[in-house]
């Protein structure tokens, strides 16, 4: 039967199907006002991958306490790093968008490959982007969660959302999810380059101490089998070896703990206090677990971290930006995308 003779209500599918690459980051509120913050926090903190507490107990805590108190405080924190004169507003949104646009530009004009970006929490949503890409002719997807180290509360929740979307599709596309790249040579080299560029750019001398801070997770998650701590420690070890940094002046810490239960240690803020009290004259801090700068890096590390260090007697403090859309950062994204496109789209670099 020819295409012309198909009945008018026959479902259509592109004759030359496309492959979609979707870059996904954690998320960001649409704005810093209380309503926007409440909407974002409710979606984020309702995820069972993020908060593993009995549902009824957590519903009461979240809706009766947290969502009545935290939006104002979190909004003030976001407001301190918000890009006021930029339509993106959120630094995380800006850098994630740029990463996708630069990857798309690198591939050039072609009719077999679509590149988009989304946020796990907030906008643009994963489901909206997958719907749009499918309408654009994509029947194969490479999902690239922008987390070098795997954690159930980050990588897995992105994949959950993708497969929840797939559950609703009568004609499911083929889906690949990029594995973690915590020990990838291209990634380690990019981190090394970013450290070296940071002090060359500012004209400051090499700091005496280097702190590598990762986002924390409850220690209980690690005991239950989450590989995140192992991935972080391997990234840190490979970076230290690549830079030949003295072990006694190299610190691996974990930030952003929430609640009363123990999280991965040592804690970033406590370590900054101790180093300041020890009279460390110069310290640089970086967050290699984040592919783009966000609240946890720009406010928690670059602002609060410096205040803590100085208040306890520390000297020079330098924050090293995330890879963002830098040349070395984009090389990592291109490399991971190429490896996961193999067999579907092979003529990409």
Image: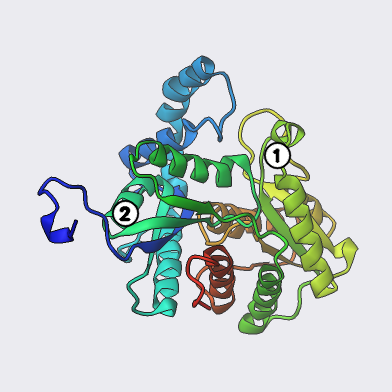
Please identify the quarter of the rendering in which residue 16 is found. bottom left
Q: Is residue 274 above or below residue 112?
A: above
> Where does the N terminus fall, quadrant-wise?
bottom left
* Residue 31 visible (yes or no): no
Q: Is residue 188 above or below residue 35?
A: below
- The x, y position of residue 122, in whole percent, is 38, 45
Mark before the other along the chain sequence, 1 or 2: 2
Judge left or right: residue 326 versus residue 211.
Answer: left
Judge left or right: residue 77 versus residue 222.
Answer: left
Give the camera-side residue of 103 and 79. Answer: 103
- The x, y position of residue 101, in whole percent, is 39, 71
Judge left or right: residue 143 versus residue 319.
Answer: left
Q: Residue furthest front?
A: 1
Q: Mark 2 = which residue?
A: 134
| SS at mark 2 in the image | helix
Give the camera-side residue of 293 and 331. Answer: 331
Q: Is residue 106 above or below residue 79?
A: below
Neighbour class for label 1 at 10 Å: few (<14), some, many (≥20)? some
Q: Mark 1 = which residue?
A: 226
- The x, y position of residue 212, in whole percent, is 72, 59
Neighbour class for label 2 at 10 Å: few (<14), some, many (≥20)? many
Contact flag, marks 1 and 2 (Cβ < 8 Å): no
Name the mark on residue 100. none
Colour scheme of the picture: rainbow
- The x, y position of residue 110, in whole percent, is 35, 76
Q: How many marks?
A: 2
- CA gap between label 1 and label 2 equals 32 Å
* Residue 277 visible (yes or no): yes
Report the residue at 56% width, 42% height from top.
156
Instruction: Name the front one of labels 1 and 2.
Output: 2
Give the camera-side residue of 51 and 182. Answer: 182
């Amino acid at each position: 039967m020819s295409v012309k003779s198909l009945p008018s209500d026959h479902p259509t599918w592109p004759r030359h199907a496309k492959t979609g690459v979707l870059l996904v980051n954690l998320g960001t509120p649409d704005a810093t006002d209380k309503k926007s913050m409440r909407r974002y926090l409710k979606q984020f903190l309702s995820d069972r991958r993020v908060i593993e507490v009995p549902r009824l107990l957590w519903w009461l805590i979240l809706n009766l306490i947290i969502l009545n108190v935290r939006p104002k405080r979190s909004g003030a924190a976001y407001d301190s790093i918000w890009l006021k004169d930029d339509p993106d507003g959120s630094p995380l949104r800006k850098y994630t968008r740029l990463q996708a646009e630069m990857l798309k530009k690198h591939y050039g004009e072609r009719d077999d490959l679509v590149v988009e970006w989304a946020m796990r929490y907030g906008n643009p949503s994963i489901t909206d982007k997958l719907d749009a890409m499918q309408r654009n002719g994509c029947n194969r997807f490479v999902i690239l969660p922008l987390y070098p180290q795997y954690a159930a509360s980050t990588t897995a929740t992105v994949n959950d959302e993708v497969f929840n979307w797939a559950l609703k599709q009568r004609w499911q596309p083929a889906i690949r999810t990029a594995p973690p790249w915590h020990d990838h040579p291209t990634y380690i080299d990019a981190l090394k380059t970013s450290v070296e560029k940071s002090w060359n750019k500012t004209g400051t001398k090499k700091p005496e101490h280097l702190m590598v801070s990762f986002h924390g997770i409850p220690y209980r998650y690690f005991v239950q089998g989450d590989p995140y701590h192992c991935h972080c420690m391997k990234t840190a070890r490979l970076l230290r070896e690549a830079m030949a940094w003295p072990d006694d002046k190299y610190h691996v810490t974990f930030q952003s703990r929430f609640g009363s239960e123990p999280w991965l240690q040592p804690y970033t803020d406590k370590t900054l206090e101790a180093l300041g009290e020890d009279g460390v004259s110069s310290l640089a801090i970086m967050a290699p677990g984040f592919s783009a700068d966000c609240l946890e890096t720009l406010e928690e590390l670059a602002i609060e971290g410096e205040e803590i260090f100085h208040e306890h007697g520390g000297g020079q403090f330098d924050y090293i930006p995330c890879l963002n859309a830098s040349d070395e950062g984009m090389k990592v994204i291109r490399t991971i995308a190429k490896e996961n496109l193999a067999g579907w789209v092979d003529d990409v670099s």
